[in-house]
Amino acid sequence: MSTTTTVTPVAFDAVPSKRRRWLRRYGLASAGALIILSWILVAILAPVLAGHAPDVVDVTQRLRPPSATHWLGTDALGRDVFARLVYGSRISLTTGIIVVVLAAAFGTLVGGVAAYARGKIEELIMRVTDLVLCFPPIILALAIAAALGIGAVNTIIAMLVVWWPKFARLARSLIIVQRSQEYVEAAVVVGLSPARILIRHIIPNSIGPLIVLVTLDIGNAIITFAGLSFLGLGVVPPTPEWGSMVSEGRELIEQWWVAAFPGLAILTIVVGFNFLGDGIRDWLDPKSRRR
Amino acid sequence: MQETTPVAHAATQRPAEPILEVEGLRTQFFTDAGVVRAVDGVSFSVAAGETLGIVGESGSGKTVAALSLIRLLEDPARIVGGKVSFQGRNVVEMSQEDLRNIRGDGIAMVFQDPMTSLNPVLKIARQLAETMLVHGRLDERQALDRSVTLLGRMGITAPERAIDSYPHQFSGGMRQRVMLAMGFANEPALLIADEPTTALDVTIQAQILDLIAELNRDFNTAIVLISHDLGVIASVCARVVVMYAGEVVEEGPTEAILSDPRHPYTWALINAVPRIDRHVPGQRRLVTIEGTPPDPIAHPPGCRFAARCPFRIAKCTEHPDLLDLAPGRKARCWVTQSGDPLLPPSTRAPVPSQAKAAMDHGAGTKLQRGERMLELRGVVKHFPLPKKTFFGKREIVHAIDGVDLDVSQGETVGLVGESGCGKSTLARVVARIHQPTAGSVVFHGQDIANAAQSRIRPLRRHMQMVFQDPYASLNPRMTVADILGEPLRLHKITGSEAETRKHIGDLLDVVGLSAKAAERYPHEFSGGQRQRISIARALSVRPDFIIADEPISALDVNIQAQIINLLIDLQERFGLTYLFIAHDLAVVRHISDRVVVLYLGKVAEVAPADKLFAEPLHPYTRYLISAVPIPDAAIEKRRKRLPLQGEPPSAINPPSGCRFRTRCPIAKSICSEVIPPMVEHRPRHFAACHFPGQF
């Protein structure tokens, strides 16, 4: 029984190569990043890529199937679907990002105040968030947007109202967790002021999950905005927007290309953000990092 | 070989036929950084009904070795070689189905964390019965009956009621009993217990260890007990295997190894631990070994311990085999091959560091040694719990319920008690992280009990704290320089940035870290090094009083000894005063001048350390001392442990009168009616008991 015992040949499982492990760990996230990056490029280069103007009506060319001149066909007013799709990426990306970033900033602030104040103020803030979260977000946004009137800016405002509570909840719980950490207690013993402890110690350590939620949520916001546009709110026609494009094509069963391509665009961008968000979460979470 | 050592006769007691034989077992982790050779050619055997201990520090491979025995390994860990034969069958080559049949039937396992090893959504009855049903020996009715019997056997009161409970209704000790009941449900031939008592209090640990030893006798189940604590091993195991850097470095009867270690690593492990039964006055420093275990990705070619070994010789550049020393005794060491024992240690005096100037205590009111520094009177801290129902009464946790405590300049006051007794809360009240519900906390002549943080801030320069968890007490997103610089800038201790940098360098030097550490982040350091950083942060403002809340309980024994030595050095150099909180009584005895025993939010006994451990007056103190396992098999065998029954009552509804009365064997009716006052029974020896010293 010495250590030099010869190893009995046993059928051990194959060890995955480094490349395989890298793919398993970062594969999805990189795919997501790639999709988002492509869409951002498309949005920036829209005038170069589109080939046609997105809002020129040409009734003679209406409902043409995909061809060499109109790659993705034309819609009921003879507008080039590809050009509208390309220009539509601009509004989807910007609204998605604006809604989520503003909601995250406001929600985190409110959640931070709740976590720090405790007591009555916390109760009040959290009950307000509960109240907003009671409604299905799209219904509430629909009602607010309808009251404010059609238009991208009004829709964004409506979405913000329903969007911030989830960030407030998350931020509050993250900060409460950090507050009881020993390094925060150590900062108290050193004599730091509460504001400094919050800024220097607590926020930098709670930001990770918020970034994950922001990334995952942009896809969500894009789909909600598209949904509102589909229902006739959101953008003012003839602005190209994916949700309203799907809406325009929803009764055209024969002319599948009118609705299918914008639908596909929504799908890819949302999937892209979800992949990236999942990837960031895994990357920030040391426990899932091992695999 | 020496025939006279206890080695020889102990070896003959070993039953012959082995049920578990491990040969050249190698388990590796395939990580991005490289292949981690966690278990690197481990061989040992366990006979039927035998008790084997596996001891080693964290990272030595003992847990991975145990998991390999029943192939409970997860990606990226794999067994890459060797043989594990259990009752003649090779576990390594077994099919998943055969493996399932063996797990829980032939081999049972109990894990460290009793809080997570039970399924929280299933009743105890279901979980217990399931282990018996899956192996198809009993029907449901029989399994339930047997569950009740087993729980009773494991010392759970009212087992009929217990099986209808959910795991969260049980305390840690009770859950570990349930785990043991599950383990023994099918009367396995072998039980593997991986640190089964590490998460438990010392009194509960004693109960569980006694139970394991009993079960071994009654069921003739062989036990493999994995622990970092030699005392735990000594109280249960007849034979011990010592692991270091993935290898077995020593093997033999427990008694022989503990009294006469033949591998320098074992020698270091034994000597690093302060002994509760053997206190040498004047000898304050513990024996430590330098350095850290080798990188498991690239083990050195020679003896893996050579770099840290105080006995090293030229031959140690060659890798030694596990060589026979005597019948049943082996060691992987060239030095002890001659048959000579390793010499007892001589503790070196500390080498004073050069950075004295930076640490000169110029600040504030300097007290003379022995003058009162901290005075607690009637301190109470209650935590209201959230209401369970809207109209319900709010429940209150009585964490501390009227504590008086004095600390004088230059002394070390130890604070001990079971978890939940309020010792950490008390520390946080003194440090004014928590505001006390009532009472006064006078520090340097000022009552800070209800003072605003801005008023306390100047006093923070005198009082600092070192925390328990070295992984949670440092902000992971700040460099060491920022962590240490923050208090310096806040209290304007250093004028210029250059001065701050110099001071940080001096601080790191004082705690035994290199100046290069300043630019690095906490995660780049080991637990012991982080605790040094934590101590440096506490020292940065040149305090005269440091609260140490379990500063060593998360560390390996050798690192524990290093940190204790550091604290003692610092005290001698800077005349520091400590409030030292720990659950390890041996450590408290070693470091403290006076000891305060806390039970359920009240002080049970206060006395100078030697007096307290020699002649405890309060029954609770006696139980606590008796529960500590001693790393000496001969003493453990002779010693009759006092069995403290039950668990501490809830701090929500503490018992009336004396709080210990519910577990006290000498309680009379007066104990439930009158709260025993704190009385000085002997000079400087106080106890709150109606019948002091009568137990």
Image (spheres, coloured by chain):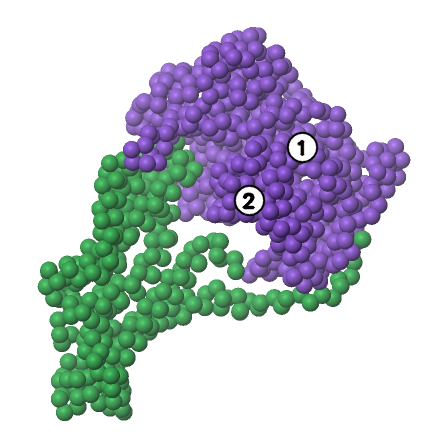
Chain colours: A green, B purple
Q: Nearer the viewer, residue B407 or B302?
A: B407
Whether residue B664 is situated above or below residue B109 in the rendered picture: above
Q: Which residue is mark 1?
A: B210
* Disc ID at residue B43: none
Tell me residue B112's x, y (percent). 59, 43
Task: Give the residue displayed 46% in from the left and 13% down from the top.
Answer: B673
Q: Is residue B576 left or right of residue B635?
A: left
Task: Give the residue displayed 78% in from the left and 38% down from the top.
Answer: B253
- Are discs 2 and 1 located on one and the same chain? yes
Whether residue B25 is situated above or below residue B369 in the rendered picture: below
* Residue B214, image quadrant: top right
Tell me residue B546's x, y (percent). 47, 26
Q: Classify 10 Å Cα crowding around label 1: few (below 14), some (14-19), many (20 and above).
A: some
Q: Nearer the viewer, residue B76 or B153?
A: B153
Determine the chain carrying the residue at label 1: B
Report how far apart the C-alphas of labels 2 and 1 lie in the structure.
24 Å
* Disc ID at residue B125: 2
- Badge 2 element: helix
Tell me residue B528's x, y (percent). 55, 39
